[in-house]
Image (cartoon, rainbow, N blue to C red):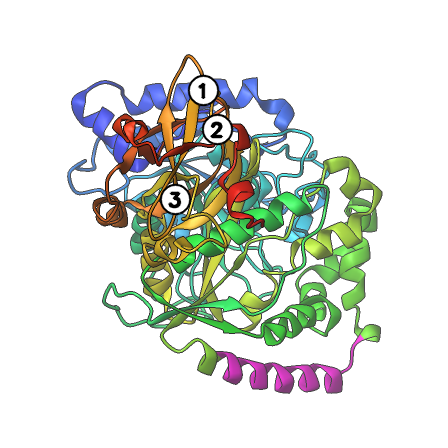
Amino acid sequence: MRKWTIDTLQASYRKGEIEPSQVMEAIVEQADAEKEMNIWITPPDLEFIEPYLTALENKDQAIAPLWGVPFAVKDNIDVAGLPTTAGCEGYTYTPTKHATVVERLIEAGAIPVGKTNLDQFATGLVGTRSPYGETHNALRSELISGGSSSGSAVSVATGQVVFALGTDTAGSGRIPAALNGLIGFKPSLGSWPVPGLVPACASLDCISVFAHDLQDVQLVHEVVQGIDEQDKWSKPFLDQATTLPKKIVLPNRPLTFFGPYQHEYQAAWEETKQRLLSLSLNVEYIDIDLFLEAAAILYDGPWVAERWAAVGDFISEHEEAVFPVTMQVLSGGKPKNHSAASLFKAVHRLKEIQLAVKHLLEDAVLVLPTCGGTWTREQVRDNPIETNSKMGLYTNHCNLLDMCAIAVPAGEAAAQLPFGITIFGMSGQDHLILRTAALFFNQQLVEVAVCGLHMRGLPFETQMQEHGAFFCEETVTAPVYRMVKIPGVIEKPGLIKNIATGESIELEVWKMPIHQFGKFAASIPSPLGIGKVELADGREVSGFLCEGYITNNPNVQDITKSRSWRKISGNHV
């Protein structure tokens, strides 16, 4: 799949390798070819796009930061001349003006190409609650795409657009990012204007963006943010220096994972925590019960009444137009279910939590898995409420606590199964989460194979940790190595390549920040050194090898038959 970025596309424009019209033609063609994925409600159309192409002729490419960049818009955000459905045909209207965010992007040279599918009325985190069809996951069709901004995320992940607008009330701008291997940025409430957005839960709603590249996210943020005098929710935010947080905050106990890949997600989280520990930032462990309590308030408390306030009148008059599970969720917000007293009680408790969280995250960021698992689309159909609820376990607290957040990819939990984390900051700390995300992305790692004293539980494991390394896997070499025991104050093994008589030797693979690797390699005494170790699966990784001359020493013992230093040392993990 194509992974467009603003920089690569605009570089092609500048070199004359491609014209915007050709890009738009390719988008229309691809959208039609992939229509069974249910990405679009109003798909890309050249007749609609043509006026925007014409308008580019009056924009200076050197000045317009988004010149010729195609983007998609979630179909609860207005684009003039295109129907806004909010995922419900009976609700449809055609706006005569753009949403403020769309207008600002167009002024910067970007081109809206169509309106994307969503969980109806932005009520859901699964991407299956739409009468326009279930949006397929970009990588594995049997799995959910995530919602409610399902079509927006998949339009980016499949390479149909460079970036896409979503919305985020409970995690809709982050869950689809995690499930499709993207970045999903949810700015501070009030930072991006919301006029032209169909409200879901108006006091918490936020427009968000999906992209492959962090620089693209930052550029869109720069273009879109800022006061809108017509927006009652708009807030002024001071420009902040690009600084790092003083610390990263992590949960102090094991987390809950779910779904058919819960064990893979848990393993991916444990590895990612080790990566975070190697970022050269202070780490603090906290109890996250306050965040979980706030998350529960969103749907178990009176805030669901705000969702009913947004569309309840329409639903009462058009029940036949509403998706059954959407009706079930929103009906929980009917006036008979909540009192003014229950609302104020929840507001007061939430203020207490907000104050406590503000102290916990002063000049700090919180990191959690974006989601604790995923589901097949069939599993969600069979159990639509519980599966959706679990998807929001680590997202629902965010807007209630007035936080900003960025969901970023963190490798794979399994083949074609992305894993992602979310970095949270308090309101106005967008610069902290963006800078932390940049540090996480730029952390280059090198795999290091160890077969002796540097393995877990053995005397030199601390040297691995001191150089920021973290354990990844147990495996074996290709069957081309001999292992010897080298005498000394501390006996140690040596791995010598011998294609003719070699065997497979057990070892561990760790990952180490590349900036630490040179210092680590320089500390290794002869006859050991670092070379390329061939693994049984065909990979070659950096690792400990021993110079062959050592076998001339009569005190050196060949221990190849043991195939493991642990068996020799008696230390087992």
Q: How far apart, in angstroms, are the residues tagged by discs 2 and 1?
A: 8 Å
Residue at point 70% right, 33% down?
Answer: 133
From the image, tell me which residue sits under label 2: 560
Is residue 350 located in the magenta-colored stretch of the structure? yes
Q: Residue furthest front?
A: 554
Q: Position of residue 411 (x, y in %)?
A: 48, 41
Q: Which mark is residue 492?
A: 3
Is 418 within the magenta? no
Q: In front: 91, or 223? A: 223
Q: Main secondary structure of the magenta part?
A: helix
Q: Is residue 74 visible?
A: no
What secondary structure is marked by label 1?
loop
Quick one: 561 or 375, which is closer to the camera?
A: 561
Measure the alpha-carbon separation of dots 2 and 3: 13 Å
Residue 447 image-quadrant placement: top left
Q: Residues within 10 Å of mark 3 (few under 14, many from 20)?
A: some
Of pointers 1 and 3, the one earlier in the residue sequence? 3
Q: Callout 3: helix, strand or loop? A: strand
The residue that disc 1 covers is: 502
Say whether disc 2 or disc 1 marks the residue closer to the N-terminus: 1
Callout 2–callout 1 Cβ contact below 8 Å: yes
Q: Where does the image place residue 96, in percent across and percent down from the top left?
A: 48, 46
